[in-house]
Image (tube, rainbow, N blue to C red):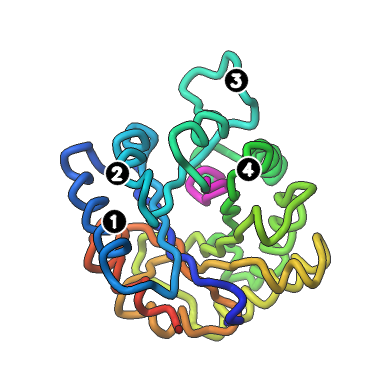
Amino acid sequence: MSFERRPLIAGNWKMNGLINSVDNLACILVKKLDLGKPTHFDLLICPPSTLLHPIGVLTEKSNLLLGGQNCHMAKHGAHTGEISAEMLKELGCSHVILGHSERRTDFYETNKLVKAKSESALAENLTAIICVGETEEEYKRGLTGGVVKKQILDSIPEGASATNIIIAYEPVWAIGTGLTPTTQEVQEVHALIRKTLGEKISIEESERTRLLYGGSVKPSNSVELMGLADVDGALVGGASLSGVDFWAIAESCPK
């Protein structure tokens, strides 16, 4: 990993947590970041939208970053149950996860839709964490490279740069299963993503863009994964709900 790319460890809490159960977790992370020694990584949590305000109050003057798990492509309007990038910004968010495989699968989100949502995020000066990854069937058929490249080319909005987008590679078959690709496979896909970004935005910007790995990341495998040349951090699911595990993954990033 280039020393110019500061590692980012992002926690995707998904649909987990009530106010009483997560206040303590957020407080633990805030104290570790703000009262301990300077860190060599950035730490981001993306709780459900119901928790953004109370956690935003806790993180407002902290080094702990806050993000949303999704946003609508419109700024406002008749979109029952949705949340806009502008609303996330008002709640103190700096990032938003877009195109996660669970959104692509459960809500049939296309590359075109992910691109539109990313455009709305960038318009509000939010950093878009754009997720890509292949299914188990695509993996077994050797289609990973083509699938991921198309997702990158079709999901990245105009005006994207290293300062406003992050790419998270999450093989669908590894999410929540305990399975992970080999480190060689992870590095190969991340190298492909960086090369594709070079075609889409510019080689210079691609070299500066942070690429995260996600999919059953835990303390037992994070040191090996975070040490790969083109891996600049992790998008963590279940392990992000444990302050001990989440912090251990962050500390595994190379200095």
Q: Earlier in the sequence, mark 3 or mark 4?
A: 3
Q: Quadrant of residue 224?
A: bottom left
**CB within 8 Å, label 1 to label 2:** yes
Segment colored magenta: 95-104
Left or right: 57 in relation to 97? left
Q: Quadrant of residue 124?
A: top right
Left or right: 15 in relation to 244? right
**CB within 8 Å, label 2 to label 4:** no
Residue drawn at (22%, 57%) of the image:
28
Disc sitting over residue 30 in the figure: 1
The secondary structure type at the circle numbered 2 is helix
Residue type, label 2: Leu
Q: Earlier in the sequence, mark 3 or mark 1?
A: 1
Disc sitting over residue 76 in the figure: 3
**3D distance between C-alphas at marks 1 and 4:** 23 Å
Q: Earlier in the sequence, mark 1 or mark 4?
A: 1
Disc sitting over residue 160 in the figure: none
Q: Give the residue at mark 2.
A: 58
Residue type, label 3: His
The secondary structure type at the circle numbered 3 is loop
Residue type, label 1: Val
Q: Nearer the viewer, residue 155 or 67?
A: 67
The secondary structure type at the circle numbered 1 is helix
| 3 vs 2, front mark | 2
Residue type, label 4: Asn
Q: Earlier in the sequence, mark 3 or mark 2?
A: 2
User: x and y percent of residue 164 in the render?
Assistant: 65, 53
Residue drawn at (58%, 39%) of the image:
108
